[in-house]
Amino acid sequence: MNTTTYTFTPDAGQCATTTSMTITVNSATTPTFAAVAAICSGSTLSALPTTSTNGITGTWSPAIDNMNTTTYTFTPDAGQCATTTAMTITVNPADNAVISYPQTTYCIFNNDATPSITGTTGGTFSSTPAGLIIDAVTGLVSISTSVAGTYSVNYTTAGICPVNVSTSLIVDLCIGISEISNSTIKVYPNPTANTLTIESSILSVDRISLINVLGDKVVDVNTYGATKSIINVSDFAFGIYLLQLHNSKGEVIYTQKISIK
């Protein structure tokens, strides 16, 4: 382990003198390498250098693993008077998150939609394209103030290894049923300030509902198949309402936007 001088002493009767020899023991060199920063699971991990910063060549084992934290051992090539060395590369797991809303499609008059998050919480929300009114922190969607359309709601986690997940959300005007026929159902006047008259010449209307932008039913009355009904709206707040007409089975057979001024 150390440089040492050795003395040779002849056996008696040989008429010979002692002599000495020094054997030099060089200290083994420890290969040095620049540390490799931690990565996220699945990220690119380059091959480790085969020459140390102090000039020692050799090989690493085991093979590079970009999915798990691993300690790698460097073995110098023969004849360099160098020792082995080790390096640990930390691989951090990626965040895991799934988001969803209670339903995929909402009518413009529905209440706000609140997401559920499975996995990593504390991230931020966004949406594309523009038009969806969404809270970046909670993911709460204001359905009634959003623009009708199909959106991608995105959620990005805030951990060391963030992920971005998305889900689809549709805001629908829900007025397609109103195309039945103006000759079949008449609603007037619209806009209105005092009363709203609904006439049905063919379809049997058994219930009338009027829904505000918060999704609350401000009118929900049975009409028992009446061909003409008059609703007093003079006490209602100004704004846009959704009129729904139902048949005897409770099915919506007609919808129309109503403006109260």
Image (cartoon, rainbow, N blue to C red):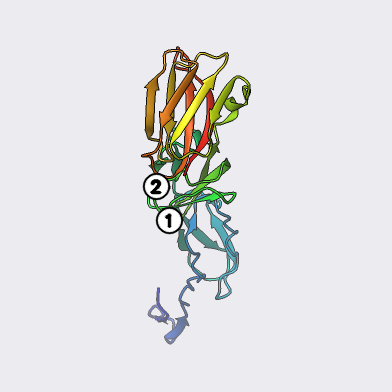
- Kind of residue at disc 1: Ala
Q: Residue furthest front?
A: 194
Residue at the disc numbered 1 = 158
In x, y percent, where is residue 219? 38, 29
Question: On residue 134, which mark appears?
Answer: none
Using a 10 Å C-alpha cutoff, classify the residue at mark 2 as few (fewer than 14 neighbours), some (14 to 19) or many (20 or more): some
Dots 1 and 2: beta carbons under 8 Å? yes
Q: Nearer the viewer, residue 126 or 11?
A: 126
Looking at the picture, tell me which residue is in the foreground, 94 or 30: 94
Q: Position of residue 194 (x, y in %)?
A: 43, 37
Q: Whole-percent x and y of residue 148?
A: 56, 41
- Residue labelled with disc 2: 120
Location of residue 52 (image quadrant): bottom right
Element under disc 2: loop
For the residues marked 1 and 2, what is the alpha-carbon distance in whole angstroms?
A: 8 Å
Above or below: residue 174 compared with residue 87: above
Residue at (56, 31) in percent of width and height? 175
